[in-house]
Image: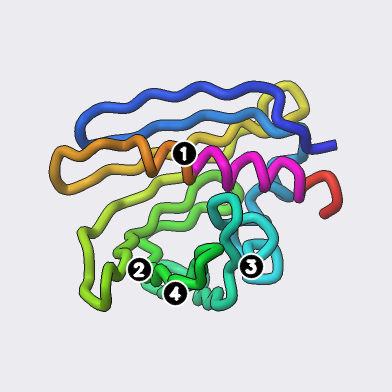
Amino acid sequence: MAARSSAAVESAERELVITRIFDAPRSLVFEAWTKPEHLVHWWRPNGFTLPVCEIDFRPGGTHRFCMRSPEGRDYWVRGVYREIVEPERIVWTAIMDEEGKPGRETVMAITFADYEAKTKLTVHQTFPEPITTRSAHQGWNESLDRLAEYLVTA
């Protein structure tokens, strides 16, 4: 039911935008972003696991994730939810701890829209300085592919 039906990508020096159409109702796609019991099934690049997934899903609430690589290296991500408009929009910050030191803070805005009995999802990630978005692009696409697969069984 939730197979990916289309994808579009744009990127610039400080931002990454990815749009996907999911064959699932907007309420289900939104919920998949809001609860640890859903996120552990799809939120990570290929080969990674998500052994820690803590969410206080409310404006001002925090999140903390540990993505574990196939080699056993842990990548910690933490941040704050800035805006939640159910089932339309989620905005949050994220800082990845690199080698035990906080990395740069990024801001993510995810929008959910009804689209021909499906859901149009747009990921918009902004970075504080110019970077290459190649690894972010790859990680997001791998996670969104997994989300499409997960929605079939959710």
- Seen in the picture, residue 50 relative to 122 is either above or below; the reply is below
Please give the residue where the numbered disc 2 appears in the rendered image.
79
Earlier residue among tags 3 and 2: 3
Please give the residue where the numbered disc 3 appears in the rendered image.
35
Earlier residue among tags 3 and 4: 3
- Seen in the picture, residue 6 relative to 4 is either above or below; the reply is above
Please give the residue where the numbered disc 4 appears in the rendered image.
64
Q: Amino acid at mark 3?
A: Lys
The part of the chain drawn in magenta is: 140-150
Residue at the image point whose x is 60% and y is 56% from the top: 47
Q: Residue 17, position in %: x, y?
A: 40, 32
Earlier residue among tags 3 and 1: 3
Q: Amino acid at mark 1?
A: Gln
Earlier residue among tags 1 and 4: 4
Q: Residue 42, position in %: x, y?
A: 65, 55
Please give the residue where the numbered disc 1 appears in the rendered image.
138
Judging from the image, what secondary structure is the residue with disc 2 in? strand
Q: Give the distance between the C-alpha atoms of the residues marked 2 and 1, in whole angstroms.
A: 21 Å
Q: Are marks 3 and 1 in contact (CB under 8 Å)?
A: no
Q: On the picture, is 88 further left or further right than 126?
A: right
Q: Amino acid at mark 4?
A: Arg
